[in-house]
Structures are given as structure tokens and as C-alpha cells.
Amino acid sequence: MSKRSNWSIPYVIFLVLFVVLPLVLVLVYAFQDNQGRFTFGNIAKFFSDRDALSTFAVSLEVALENTVLCILIGYPAAWILSNRKLNRSAVTIVLFILPMWINALMRTLATAQLFTMLGVTLGKGTLLFGMVYDYLPFMIYPIYNVLAKMDKSYAEAAVDLGATPWTAFWKVTVPLSMPGVASGILMVFMPTVSTFAISEFLTNNKIKLFGTIIQENINSSMWNYGAALAFIMLVIIGITSLFNKDKEAEGSLL
Amino acid sequence: MDKIIDIRHLSKSFGDKKVLEDINLYIRRGEFITLLGPSGCGKTTLLRMIAGFLAPDEGAILMDGKDLVGIPPHERPLNTVFQRYALFPHLDVYDNIAFGLKLKKVPQDEIDKRVRKVLKLVAMSDYEDRDVETLSGGQQQRIAIARAIVNQPKVLLLDEPLAALDLKMRKDMQTELKEMHRKLGITFIYVTHDQEEALTLSDTIVVLNEGRIQQIGTPTDIYNEPVNSFVADFIGESNILNGTMVRDRRVAFIGHEFDCVDEGFGEDNPVDVVIRPEDIYFTTEAEKTQFTATVKSCTFKGVHYEMFVDTDTGNELMIQDYDAYPVGSTVRLYIEPDDIQVMRKERTDNTLPGTVKDAETIEILGGAFALKSGFEPGTEVTVQVPFDAVDLLDNLDDGVLSGEVHFILYKGDHYHLTVRTDDGDDLWVDTDDIWDKGDLVGINFKSKGIKIRRKDE
Amino acid sequence: MKKFFAKLYIWVLLVILYAPLVFIAVFSFTESKVLGSWEGFSTTLYHNLLTGQMQGNASLLAAVKNTVLIALAAAFISTLLGTVAAIGIHNLKGRRKKAVTLLNNIPMINPDIITGVSLFLLFVFLHFSQGYLTVILAHITFCTPYVVLSVMPKLQQMNPNIYEAALDLGATPSQALRKVLVPELKPGMVSGFILAFTMSLDDFAVTFFTRGTIGLDTLSTYIYTDARKGGLTPELRPLMTLIFLIILILLVIINVRQDRINKQTVQR
């Protein structure tokens, strides 16, 4: 038996080389100047850079709004899809998941083009619409998964104890589906902050998101500053995943 | 009589499948009543209709004279203990139990008092703040009961509440449930497939099979006087044998005649005879001996020995006794008249409708059987197929029809099977071959003994 | 009534969700350079795409080829690496198992851009020249965890004794692996492969940072560069339509079949 546990060794080496080491490098580059000396300068630069700070704030705001909209629109959809009385066809569910399999860039571009044709000015509104459009399936699917697997007898027990179907929904079904919502948030919030191409397409470069400035800095060879910005994003990921301790348990993409 | 629940002409189908058919049943106030039957017999469906999670297709469920049908479950004055408890995992023990009271806006100090009281009743005081998922199966069971009875329902419904527990735990919980029922004085409606549990706990047992009530009675009635071979086979161990009622108080089976206490079965009529294995006695006295047998096997079962014997007439019987008899020995046996339970046969052959196709074939249940009838093609006929004229074949394609072995009864020297065809019709078969429940078989008829007559004759 | 509103809600959402895709599909049947102006029905764009005679940039076909090749390579290697790793992790115990599982989760939690930037820094740091190899390595990095997660449940469902049973019956360890273990894990490996393949096809950010400067383009980076230049190659429209149709048909077939299998097992 102990022998077969050794089978994990190649993958562990791979992970160390291609996951851990690169993240360490992000940290190293973030705290170095271009001569390779230790410095807090890159971090300091971010906090004194008005444009970067406002981009950062806008990114968080857009991500937050996108996440909330996805929950508000996606939860009822997931609930309807998971309810055997309201939806019996597997095909409707497939239709909701299907966009996840299509290149996001392609879909975003199509949305932007549609807006242009309809004469809608590209800006904050179109950005949010496009974001919701891109990320809604990622919210619906994990919630749907949790709801579909949930033991029906919980809701029945609540009704049996005197709750109206509406109270049973709010007091039992919703709290029990929170793991799905949590992994939905994880799959929507961070990716929104970090996208770079989508916001460019949907706002005609009017609104920049945090991902875009990372990309611009790396592309213009300002690696250290780029790494510092990536490091700041890593810190935020750390914070959000604290709220998602049980993420593994249920509702993940699989 | 004080009826709390009166169920009248209740029927329910899922799709084309009839799950319950014309159920009539009343439940006395304060009694412990058990709905007992194999899986798929409709017992849980019946319970869920009483609780309000399913609506009946037809019929009424009266509670204190008022029809419950149409009243949503949250307005019914009864509570349920669910199969896998369904304790809310996001709430702790206290909040689970207080759930119903909070919804009813009971004042907080009253809630506290009542939660404490039921926790004491189920012997779970001090567990208030525990997370329900950290509790053992037995503890979760108690909390599920506490959560239901804290609402002071008039009737408590329990859906196989002990099924998820291990044997030892189940025995302990049975005693506690009985005790709780006594203390609370409310009506318990209990669903189980475990006949032993039903016999131990109940005041009244309702035996269900295939959506119909087979028998209603006290545990003693049901055990001692099963009304048909299904009940006899399902409840306890039994020898079920083919017999003939010679005359009143005299019945013949296993090649011998016995005195019995049953009357009114006519003369020379075929009957089913049930003998419980503990009711066959060993003797050494020649004048008491009714028949002799050879012991084939003997197994110690903890309190008694279980023996299989071959009678002098070639039938196999199961006997339970406190003494062991060596394998191979010849023993003398007798049965007391009031231990012989005689039952009218539900059927003596398969009576099936058919249509004559040509001189050589008759179409029965959708299959063309090679049977000569002498009637004109197109004549509608009634075909009587004796149980032993049905041939079961290993190869599905060799049969005119195919089906599945649905129910098996051992009758001492042969097996009596219920075979369900692919179209859902039942055929009864006597065979010496050993089949298992669920076996797929081809079906054919041997022509010997089959009677064909014009329909309506 | 409730059912009517539920259905309405679902269908309104679906219509909005699919409007842009349908819009692209409709305009794939006209020749106009700019999206949105209808210049009469024509299948010229499809013809151009399939014969490779582009009005616009001819490297579109090369990008499609790259995308598929990279996805195949990455999915294949990820499936091997991930399956072996899953067997290893399954046999680990206690804190080690937790540590490796945590490590396996990192690439899944990381947004694409972090994975991209950090791998970019790695290749720069190692003076590794970037191209096909680095893109494939990067794709393996974010695909393998999904393979591990697909194979794991199969290992947990599997009777732990079947491998020993095979050995007991005289199989060599490698025979036991091929004849017993792999067939048991196959469904997990297949879904892991499909997942890895589609993740790789979808990727933009990681490819963008690891493709170097040799002019390697996948479909995503091609679209990005093309869109930044202003005009979109018109042949992208029929291409998107075809991809969309293929995926739609595949998913519907898989699900309808799955549905039928489920129904049959329920009936038995």
C-alpha cells in the first residue's frame, strides 16, 4: 500500500515546479526593484498611484455588482431548474451550462457587437450586462447542483412542522443551499476582478479593470510592478477564500 | 368507538401504476398502529397522504370527522418523524426542536420550557447546543422524535424511523418508543417492513401488499390467524401447505388427515393450511403420533433449535423446538387441532381470457399459445390453466410470453410462484424447480389439464 | 400559473443568453465585412473558411489548428499525470493527503491571470524560451487538478480490495493495473479528459502570457488581437457558428443518452 502512495510524487514535483515556485516568484519580483534589490517600492507605488487605485476600486465594485446580479438572477433560475415539478427536461439544464463550454472571448465579442448594432453606447451598463451574461452560468450551475441533490425531506419536514411553503423555502432551502452560492461567488467574483479582455471589448476601452493594468505592466516589461499588482490580487483571493472554507464539499464545477 | 382517523376508499396511482387501491381503515384514538408490508406495497404512500405530502386520486381521510384532503401539510394537526430524520443541518439541536414553535410565535420562555421538557423525555438533556451532524444515529433519531412531539400533535407519523440503526440500537429504541407512546398518550402511526418490529410495538397491525390491505388485527390475531398465504409467509416463519377440507373440523394435508377447529369450508374443497414451526410437537407415545419424519438438518438458533424434516409422505416441514434431535433419526410428530390454521385458497388455477385464433392457437395475454379448442376462430373464451401446467423456461425467447418471478412461497413439496409478465399480468405457477425472486423467465403452457370454455358460459 | 411564470422566466433568460450567439450565426450567412449590415444571403464565408481562402487574415486556420493541437496534448498529458496522481493521493493518509489536496486546489482557485503571470515569471526566471512547449506546460498546470478531481470519486467508490483480488488471482501488478484498476477508473478519466480539453480550448489569459513572441496564436489570442486591431475577420462568424453547433449537438446527445440510461435503471 505504501508503495502506491508514492505515485503522487511526480505530480507533487510538478506542482512545486509549476505552481508553488511561480507563486514564490510573484512574491520575489513584487518586492524587488529592477536591479534585483529588496524594496517595498512597488507596493508603495500602487498605493500612491491614483489611477491604479481607482481602477482597483472600480474593479471591486464591478465584481461585487456582477456577483450580486448573478445571484439575484441565477438563484431563481437554479431553483426552477432543480424543481422536478417545474422542470423535467435535462435539455433546459444543458442549455444553461452550454455557454460555459464556449470561448468567453467569443461570447463577449458577440455581445459587444450586438450592442453596437443596436446602437447602445458601450460603458458601465454594457459592461455589467456582458459580465452577467458571461458569468451567470457559473452561478447557476453550482446552486443548481446543491439544490438538485438536496434531500426533499428537509423542506417537507419544515412544512410538517407548520411552515408555509414560502417560510420553508427561506428558513430551510435557502440556508442549506449556501454552499452552492458560496462556490458560485468564488467562480464569479475573482474572475471578474481579474478579467482583462472582456472589459476592453464591452466598454471600448473606456473602463479598465484591475486585470488590464496587470497585463499592461507585464506587457511593457514592468515585471516588478506587474508582480506587485498580482501579489495584491493574491491577497484578495486569500481573503475571499476564507469565506469559502466548505467550497470543496459541494457544488463545485464537477 | 373513538375513531381519530377514518380513511375511506382511498386510491392513488403513479402514472399507470396503482399504488393504493380502495383503502378503508380507521384508527382509534391513542393506539399504536403499524402499516406493515414489503417495499413497494404502498405503506409509505399511505403515510405521506395522511401527512399531506401527496394528494389521493380518490377517497377521503377524515380526522375527527373533518376531511384532511385539500388541507396543506403545515395546517394539519399531525407531525412526522422522517425516514432519515431530516434534521436541519444548519440548525443546532435546540433550534431544530424549536423550529415549529417559533413559526407558531410561541413566547420565548414557553419555547424554552417545552424544548427542555421534550429533551428530557427523549433522554437528551444537555445536548441543546450540539450540532446535529455530530450526533450518532440513535441520538439523531431521538431529536427527530423530540422535534415532532414538541408541537403536541394529535397524531405522530413515523416513517421507518429505526431502519437506519443497527440491530442493538433498534431493539433499545423499540422499547423507548413503546414507553414514549404510553407517556404521551397520543396516536402513533408507524410504517415498517420489519414484521418483528411490528409485532413487538403495535396495538394494531395493518398488513399491506401490492396496494391492498391484506389483514387488519392485533399482533396475536395476525400471527395466529393469518387470512391468506401472503400474510402467513410475511409474518414469522411458517409451513404453508396445500390441503383439502374433508368436512367440518377435519382437514387433510401432507398425506394425512388431522382434526382441526375450522368450519364452513365445505366438503372436499382445496384449502391452504398454515402450521407455525413451533406448533409441531415431538412425542414418544405411539397413540399421540400422527405421522413420522426423518430429521434432515438441525441448527441452533440461540434459544431454540430449527429443524427441517422429511415426512413419511415426502413433504418438507420446518420445526422449532427446545430439544435437538439428531440428523438422520426418525421422529414421531403431532399437531394440536387449534394450531392448524385453515385458509380459503385465493385461487385454484389461472383463469384467463383468450381469443381463438385458429384450430391450433389461442391468444392469451397477448401471446399465441398452441392450444386446441375446437371453437371457431374469433371466439372469446375463458381458459383455466392449472398452476402446474405453466412451464417456466430459462431462455426468455423460448417462451410465448416472458416475465419476472415476483413472489415465492414454499409449500412443503413444491414452490408456488407469482410470475409477473412484461405487460404486468400475474400468473401463478407450481414448480419443483428452484427460482429466485427477480429471475427473468420465458412462459409457456403445457396442454395437459387446461380447460377451455366459451366466455360467459 | 406558478409553472407558467417559472417557464417564462427560464425561457426569457435563455433567449437573452443566446441572443448574441444567434446574432452571430445569422450574420454568418451574409458576406458583409462589418457585423450588422445584411448584404443578402450567402454561404461564401463558410466556403472561404473551409477552403482556407480568407478575405481577411489567413492565420485564422493556423490558430484553430494550434488550439486543437495544444488542447489535445494538454488534455492527454493531464489525464495521465492526473490519474497517476489521484491513485497516489488516494493512498496517502493524514496530513500529507491534506497538504497535497490543498496544493492541488491552488491552480483551481487562482484566477487565470495569476496563473498566467506567475508562469510567465517562471519561464523568464529560468530563461526558458516561450512557445508551444510553455503553453502546453501551462495548460497542463491548470487542467490536471480537474482530472484529479474527476478520478478521485471513482477511487473512493471502488472496492479497495479489487486490486488485491487481482493480485491474489495471479495477476502481476501491471496486469492488475491494466485489467482491473484502469477499467474501473475509466469513466473518471474520460470526464477528466473532456474537462481538460474544454478548459484548454477556452483559455485565453494563460496562453496570452506564456506564448512568447514567436507569433504563436490560438483562437482566443487571435480573436483578441484581431478585435484590438478594430476589424473582425468575417470568417470568424461561420467558425463560431460551427463550434457552437458542434458543442450543442454533443452536449444534447450526451445528456439525452444519460437521461435514457437513468430512466431505464429506474424502471428495472
Image (cartoon, coloured by chain):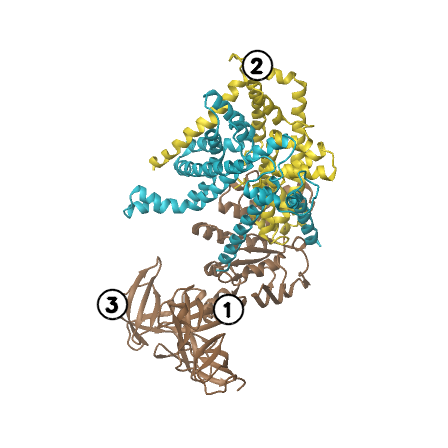
Chain colours: A yellow, B brown, C cyan
Observer-nearest of A210 and B134:
A210
The residue shown at (45%, 68%) is: B403
Whether residue B454 is visible here, answered yes or no, is yes
- Subunit of label 2: A
- In three-dimensional space, the C-alpha distance between marks 3 and 2, rounded to whole angstroms, equals 96 Å
Q: Which residue is mark 1?
A: B424
Q: Tell us which disc is closer to us: 1 or 3.
A: 1
Say what amino acid the circle numbered 2 marks: Phe
Say what amino acid the circle numbered 3 marks: Gly
Say what amino acid the circle numbered 1 marks: Gly
Q: Tell us which disc is closer to us: 3 or 2.
A: 2
Counting other residues with Cα less than 10 Å from the Cα at mark 1, is it few (<14), some (14-19), or many (20 or more)? few
Q: Earlier in the sequence, mark 1 or mark 3?
A: 3
Q: Which residue is mark 3?
A: B328
Give the image location of residue A75, x and y in percent.
Answer: 64, 43
Q: Are marks 1 and 3 on the same chain?
A: yes
Q: Secondary structure at mark 1?
A: loop
Above or below B193: residue A24: above
- In three-dimensional space, the C-alpha distance between marks 2 and 1, rounded to whole angstroms, equals 80 Å
Q: Secondary structure at mark 2?
A: loop
Q: Are marks 3 and 2 on the same chain?
A: no
Give the image location of residue B68, x and y in percent.
Answer: 67, 60
- Subunit of label 1: B
The residue shown at (70%, 41%) is: C36
Give the image location of residue A128, x and y in percent.
Answer: 68, 35
Badge number at residue A40: 2
Counting other residues with Cα less than 10 Å from the Cα at mark 2, is it few (<14), some (14-19), or many (20 or more)? few
- Subunit of label 3: B
